[in-house]
Amino acid sequence: MKFIYVALGGAFGAMARYAISLLPVKSDFPILTLVTNILGAILIGFVVGLADNHENVSDEAMLFLKTGVCGGFTTFSTFSLETVNMFDEKRVFAGGLYMVLSCTCCVIGVIVGRKISKAF
């Protein structure tokens, strides 16, 4: 049954990620992946923070939300490929900037999500 929670959450997360990718943004910089990773970081921080603040969050809910939804939503593998592609294209500054922004903003996103969860 636990696999079902993860699968359902993963499907929801993947659909949300795909919906963001359809936004009409034209850029050589992978801004939509960056936004998705930041939102995913905020979301996982919120989910974990909520679980920390409320003892009644079930293991099943965590599997659905953290492993499923967040795992299906975030796009770190895509981020990695896009970074390598920028380096291959000799766009070293853009690739480096993308790495720094992604890592920094997503770590901050987890912190923000945890803080937001304290209001619930």
Image (cartoon, grey):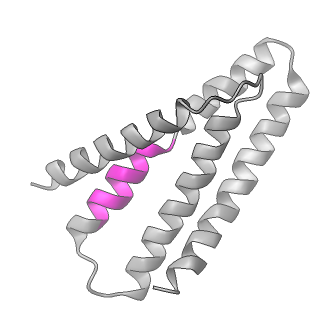
Marks counted in the figure total 0
The image quadrant where one finds the N terminus is bottom left
* Residue 54 in the figure: left or right of residue 114: left
Q: Residue furthest top?
A: 89
Residue shown at 32% from the left, 50% from the top:
68
Which residue appears at 62% of the width and 36% of the height? Answer: 33
> Residue 115, position in %: x, y?
60, 79
Q: Is residue 71 magenta?
A: yes
Quick check: 114 above or below 70?
below
Residue 54 position by quadrant: bottom left
Q: What span is in magenta?
A: 62-74
Task: Name the residue furthest left.
Answer: 1
Assign the magenta stretch its main secondary structure. helix
Q: Is residue 101 left or right of residue 72?
A: right
Locate the C terminus by quadrant: bottom left
Q: Would residue 49 be counted in the magenta stretch? A: no
Residue 34 higher or lower than 79, as above or below: below
Q: Position of residue 23 (x, y in %)?
A: 58, 33
| Image position of 47 with respect to 32: above or below | below
**Picture coordinates of residue 119 (x, y %)?**
52, 87
Give me the residue at 31% from left, 66% from top: 62
Look at 53% across and 38% down and name the residue there: 20
